[in-house]
Amino acid sequence: MVVAPRYPWQKAIFTTAVEFGPEPLTVLTGAIPAGLRGTFYRNGPGRLQRGNQRVGHWFDGDGAILAVHFQDGSAQGLLRYVQTAGYQAEERAGRYLFPNYGMTTPGPLWERLFGKNVKNCANTSILPLADRLLALWEGGAPHQLDRQSLQTLGLDTLGSLTSTTPYSAHPKRDPQTGEIYNFGVSLGRHATLHLYRSAPNGVIKKRVDVALEGLPLIHDFVMAGRYLVFMIPPVRLNILPLMFNLKSYSEALEWQPDLGTKLLIIDRENLAMVQQGEAPAWFQWHFANACEITPDLIRCQLVRYADFATNEYLREVSAGNPVTEAPGHLWEMELNIKTGHLERETQLTERDCEFPVVPDTQVGQSWRYTYCSMKRAGANVVKEIDSVMGCYDQQTQTWQEFDCGVGYYCMEPVYVSEGNYLINLIFNSHQEQSELWIFPAAQFTDGPCCQLRLPAIVPFGFHGKWAQD
Ligand SMILES: [Fe+2]
């Protein structure tokens, strides 16, 4: 069933990505900064439909990677699907074959009874390494791609990942050492949190397993000086209906606010538990950043939701008819390392926002500016998507913003440390085209210094990264 667009932004989400490039991008306004040398990568679901079948949730789409390479004042764009085994099998079959985050096993009864493994969609984020690119998903191993051609080279075990040790989509890279920290959650009677510490080339050097209570959903964590911090929201998987293919993973997730939020503070050196704590119930997909502000105290920012309705809202957005109100707000918290208690919780805005980012050079360290995407002031938080880029200044405790304009939509800003730029993928609903806007980060409120047109609509996805040449 084809969903007829009801809102101007819908083609930014429903359009099935068509591979293109490498080809030069057209400059619409301004000029590409001469010193910009490197590649803007972003990942997201490239297709939400096959024939008359639609996916169950936005998170189910097959990963498609956009790469825009900048050199000597020019830009070349390239878009490729990640050639996962599931994508290739479904391409051959011409229909969906596998269960997914928001889908039970599709197809005839005999196929559904025997069950299948969930498809690794490789659709969530991207991790550029010196010699390769990783397309990340949180339920399995990353896929390895060639940095230039985006050719898929297969699953990457990072030296030791197995089918029972997934690698999540929000790794944190130490800006000083280049070491990479990440986690994965595997399911059993209870869940296990696998903590990974990797060399700059991605190879896992140390793994520690932590037993968790129940089967929680953990999407992100945060690095804070010498520590890693997890805030585990009270979402738990009811595994029986999932095992019997009666519900998808998403449908089997239950909001259990009485459990509260579990706080884990981990020593970054040896991955040992330092302290645990409890806090009231909330849900977050994403942290902005964290740092140690005293020997006892961690400061942390995250986009916090009152509950797990955001999951349903994101499903509805991808189905074309959002009705659930689920705003997220940037919060700042201070966590006592010795006691595991939250000492302070401050909501920094009333505006609905997401995708908080800080410069890569400040991850896990003190920082000043947090960039994010936001909804326009006064916008209908259910029917509109983000069209404003925001920035919270910790020093002055003030917000600045740039409104992309009516009919223009944005997603996660990607920070470029070399030259101090922000790059965002924009959907221009007037021309029905995707554009890349480049902003000098220090004056982003003045608007982009360059606007580029992409050869085709690149559907909105989740996360991107800049990689220097
Ligand atoms: Fe994410």
Image (tube, helix red, strand yellow):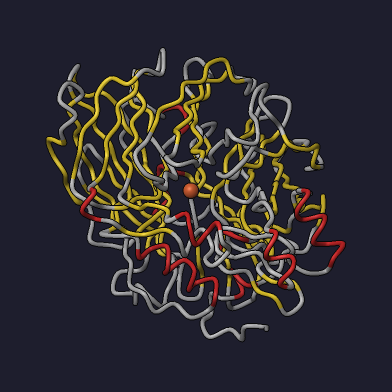
Q: Quarter of the image containing the C terminus?
A: top right
Q: Looking at the image, which residue is at 69% across and 51% down?
A: 66
Q: Looking at the image, which residue is at 62% across and 23% down?
A: 202
Q: Nearer the viewer, residue 110 or 94?
A: 110
Looking at this view, name the residue that lies furthest to the right: 92
Q: Nearer the viewer, residue 340 or 363?
A: 340
24 on left or right of 141: right
Task: Give the total of numbered labels.
Answer: 0
Q: Nearer the viewer, residue 141 or 353?
A: 141
Residue 314: x percent and y percent?
46, 66
Q: Looking at the image, which residue is at 64% across and 20% down?
A: 201
Q: Looking at the image, which residue is at 79% across and 61% down?
A: 90
Residue 18: x percent and y percent?
77, 64
In the rendered image, the vertical position of residue 414 relative to residue 101, given as above or below? above
Residue 399: x percent and y percent?
27, 52
In the rendered image, the vertical position of residue 462 relative to residue 74, given as above or below? below
Residue 136: x percent and y percent?
61, 42
Q: Nearer the viewer, residue 37 or 322?
A: 322
Q: Quadrant of residue 319?
A: bottom right
460 on left or right of 230: right
Q: Quadrant of residue 291?
A: top left
In the rendered image, the vertical position of residue 160 relative to residue 410, given as above or below? above
Q: Quarter of the image containing the N terminus?
A: bottom right
In the rendered image, the vertical position of residue 325 relative to residue 27, given as above or below? below
Looking at this view, name the residue that lies furthest to the left: 343
